[in-house]
Image (cartoon, rainbow, N blue to C red):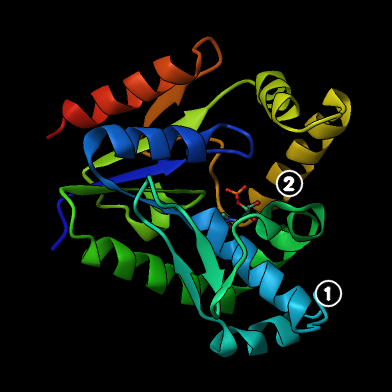
Amino acid sequence: MTGTVVAVDGPAGSGKSSVSRAAARRLGFDYQDTGAAYRAFAWFCLQSGVDVKNQAEIAEAVPGFSYTIGTDPDGYFVQVGGTDVTDDIRTPPVTSIVSSIARVPEVREHLIRLFRGIIAESGRPGIITEGRDITTVVAPDADVRILLTAQPEVRAARRAAEVDGANHVDIAAQLSARDAKDSKVVDFLNAAEGVTTLDSTDLDFDQTVDAMVELVRATI
Ligand code: C5P
């Protein structure tokens, strides 16, 4: 049975995953990272030798793909067919192809069905699901809908701080290239009607989590 449904969207490097997970932990909610599912499918395509430039081949790989994601914010993991890929899906080979994989309609249809199933089956008082199209496509009727954003240079600086030896300018270019590709599929740069924008440009991590938790508490 589903309790409170919270939908969070935002661009690359906006902190959606870490903020949503921390907010879920504070609220005693489940947490669903949908970007991880697209990444897991991209990893699966690479492992299976799928030609990732060929949309028909990508679509054909969909039925053979199964993944498990930990929705406990304290027990986060991602598995593909029994293999733990939690770290592997964050590596450059996956990040560089995930946008091309995610725009294939058969991939989106399949994963969106699974995302909705996970929301429907959540046994906790609520679930925070984050991605790019959660407020608009996956769960447009969610109780709370948030667009988490931050100025591009702030997102790049935060991401660079997470990666050893990363060059700020390279990271900024990578984030904006991925956003440009992804926003052709779904608009996550502008808040849809009824969606609250949470701009974290001038907030630190804890303040952003506080603000998200407040938005949820104001609704329940
Ligand atoms: O959130 P994250 O950066 O891990 O997402 C990885 C990729 O998955 C995005 O760049 C995008 O191509 C895709 N994605 C998507 N729809 C979502 C979540 C992620 O297309 N709801």
Which mark, residue 53? 1
- Horizontally, residue 5 falls left or right of residue 87, namely left
Judging depth in this view, the residue of 67 and 145 nearest the camera is 67
Q: Is residue 14 visible?
A: yes
In the displayed structure, would residue 116 be above or below residue 71?
below
Judging depth in this view, the residue of 33 and 71 nearest the camera is 71
Confirm or reject: label 2 Cβ below 8 Å from ligand 1. Answer: yes
Residue kind at label 2, given as amino acid type: Arg
Distance from disc 1 to disc 2, alpha carbons, whole Å, reads 16 Å
Under circle 1, the secondary element is: loop
Quarter of the image for the N terminus: give it: bottom left
Near mark 1 (Cα within 10 A), the count class, few <14, some 14-19 or many ≥20, is few
In the displayed structure, would residue 195 be above or below residue 129?
above
- Residue 196: image location, x then y, percent: 35, 29
Judging depth in this view, the residue of 99 and 193 nearest the camera is 99
Residue that mark 2 sits on = 178
- Horizontally, residue 136 falls left or right of residue 153, namely left
- Residue 180: image location, x then y, percent: 72, 44
Residue drawn at x 57%, y 75% as measured from the top left: 107
